[in-house]
Amino acid sequence: MTDAAGRRDCVHMQLTIPKPMIRFVACGDDQIDRKRLDAWADRIKDWKSKGLLSAEFFISGHEEDKTPDNIKYFQSKF
C-alpha cells in the first residue's frame, strides 16, 4: 500500500493479507503528516484486533531530514 498526501484517492486501505507493507510518503507539513500518521496508527491497531500478524511501515518524503522525527512520532503511537 502507498499513501501519498497529494493522491489520497488512490490509497488502498483494506487489509487483504495479514502482513501488509505500507509506504507512507510524507508531504513535509508536520500537521498534515502527523494527522495521517495518527490515522495509520489507529488503522493498524484495528487490523491487529482483526488478525494482523505484522506490518512493514516505511516512511519517506520530500524533506528527508524530517523522516527520523516522523518515525519517532509514529513509533510512540504503539
Image (spheres, rainbow, N blue to C red):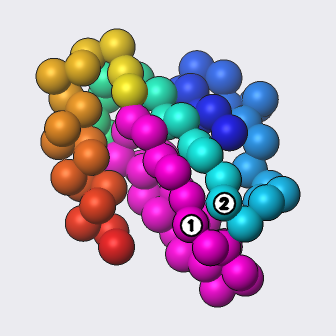
**Can you see residue 32?**
no
Pointers 1 and 2 in contact (CB under 8 A)? yes
Q: Is residue 6 magenta?
A: no
Q: At numbered mark 2, what does the secondary structure look like: helix, strand or loop? A: loop
Q: Which of 53/60 is in front?
A: 53
User: What residue does disc 1 label?
Assistant: 54
**Mark 1 to mark 2 CA distance (whole Å):** 5 Å
Q: Is residue 45 left or right of residue 18?
A: left
Residue underneath mark 2 = 19
- Residue found 58% across the figure and 43% down from its top: 22
Residue 39's disc number: none
Q: Which residues are magenta?
A: 33-59
Given residues 60 and 27, the one toward you in this image is 60
Magenta stretch, overall SS: helix
**Does label 1 or label 2 sit earlier along the sequence?**
2
Work out which residue is located at the far bottom of the displayed protein and give it: 49
Task: Give the residue type that dot 2 points to.
Answer: Lys
Pick the residue in front: 74 or 51: 51
Crowding at label 1, few (<14), some or many (≥20) Cα neighbours within 10 Å? Answer: some
- Which quadrant of the figure has residue 45? bottom right
Q: Quadrant of the C terminus?
A: bottom left
Percent x, y for residue 32?
A: 39, 38
49 displayed left or right of 62: right
Query: Which residue is drawn at the image coordinates 38% and 27% (left, top)?
Result: 60
